[in-house]
């Protein structure tokens, strides 16, 4: 990991990611790139001079409007730069290499572009309100747009995350037996190795046997269903143990857990029960109606967990 791109908008919410960045950057040997994207809507309202001219009917020249606009832009840029400089100084005091950048444009588009410029070896780190359901769909969020547009891994910290941040002791990586899910393992392993953390490999066995055997289960005895489910669990556990064995050369402490249940629920519950500090998982990155119609485990986890989450976009 070479660069952690940290978008900030001046709000308390966006700044909640900074303690995590302060911990991860030294662990990963990464520099930090603070980014603030400003838009026309961020410009302050009309100046008093313009208001008075409007009240008294004094005509406003094009030159005056241009001067006022430039004054507003300069004032905004100075405020934004001062804010970034203050945040950068805090990170520099912790011994972290920091640069900051102010850009104009659409926040999500600029974040994705800056991260791609820093790739490979980049990570986007940002806070999110974590709205779910129709509220998230109607409002959208910069984080949601970034997740579904970038090829760069994204660290997301929910607003309800614990205020005290420490190096991760337990990292959870959900797997489903596919090569796509395993694409999250290199990053998860790198963080676990740097932090001397436990890496927990988790597999959920869905209690809908029809999905596995391709035949309706109605009418089968319960004992037979339980036996088949137990066999699936054992198969999943052996698969995880083989994966863990291949990782132990780099990460000494690798644990395996197989839970019967639905993936998103299992991930959220196990992260809470096991006091996990970080979830690292793969996502297909579908956007728009396809994501809304299909749903995805990563998307459901994002909007249900308060555990910091790294989403790794997979290559099909």
Image (cartoon, rainbow, N blue to C red):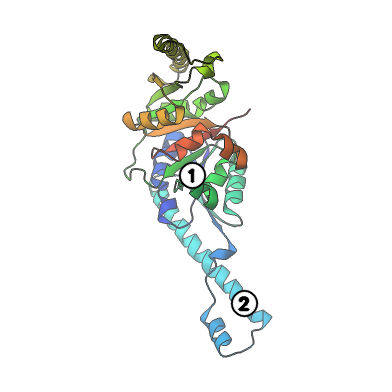
Residue 142, x across and y down, in percent = 53, 50
Q: Is residue 29 visible?
A: no
Q: How many marks on residues?
A: 2
Residue at 50 percent across and 61 percent down: it is 80
Secondary element type, mark 1: helix
Distance between the alpha carbons at the discs numbered 1 and 2: 45 Å
Taking the image as drawn, is residue 159 in sight? Answer: yes
Residue 222 position within the rendered picture, expressed as x and y whole percent measured from the top left: 40, 12
Q: Residue at x 51, y 26 (%)?
A: 186
Q: Determine the residue positioned at 54% across, 86% down.
A: 52
Mark 1 vs 2, N-terminal side:
2
Q: Which mark is residue 133?
A: 1
User: Residue 292, how many percent across, how many down?
Assistant: 57, 40
Where is mark 2, residue-wise? Answer: 67
Residue at 59% across, 40% down: 150
**Neighbours of disc 1 within 10 Å: few (<14), some (14-19), many (20+):** few
16 w.r.t. 75: above or below: above
Task: Check disc 2 and report its element: helix, strand or loop.
Answer: helix
């Amino acid at each position: 990991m070479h660069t952690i791109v940290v978008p900030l908008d001046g709000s308390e919410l966006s700044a909640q990611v900074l303690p995590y960045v302060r911990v991860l950057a030294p662990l990963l040997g990464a520099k930090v790139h603070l980014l603030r994207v400003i838009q026309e809507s961020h410009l302050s309202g009309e100046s008093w001079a313009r208001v008075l001219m409007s009240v008294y009917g004094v005509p406003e020249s094009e030159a005056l409007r241009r001067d006022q606009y430039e004054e507003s832009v300069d004032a905004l840029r100075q405020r934004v730069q001062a804010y970034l400089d203050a945040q950068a100084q805090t990170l520099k005091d912790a011994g972290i290499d920091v640069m900051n950048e102010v850009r104009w444009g659409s926040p999500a588009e600029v974040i994705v572009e800056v991260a791609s410029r820093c790739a490979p070896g980049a990570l986007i780190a940002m806070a999110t309100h974590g709205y779910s359901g129709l509220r998230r769909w109607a409002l959208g969020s910069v984080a949601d747009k970034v997740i579904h547009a970038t090829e760069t891994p994204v660290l997301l910290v929910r607003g309800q995350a614990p205020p005290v941040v420490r190096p991760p002791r337990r990292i959870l990586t959900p797997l489903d037996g596919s090569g796509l899910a395993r694409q999250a393992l290199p990053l998860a392993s790198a963080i676990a190795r740097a932090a001397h953390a436990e890496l927990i490999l988790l597999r959920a066995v869905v209690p809908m046997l029809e999905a596995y055997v391709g035949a309706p289960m109605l009418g089968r005895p319960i004992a037979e269903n339980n036996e088949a489910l137990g066999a699936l669990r054992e198969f999943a556990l052996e698969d995880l143990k083989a994966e863990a064995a291949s990782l132990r050369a780099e990460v000494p402490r690798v644990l395996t857990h197989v839970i019967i249940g639905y993936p998103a629920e299992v991930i959220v519950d196990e992260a809470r029960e096991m006091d996990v500090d970080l979830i690292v998982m793969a996502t297909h990155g579908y956007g728009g109606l396809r994501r809304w119609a299909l749903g995805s485990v990563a998307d459901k986890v994002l909007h249900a967990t308060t555990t910091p989450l790294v989403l790794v976009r997979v290559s099909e």
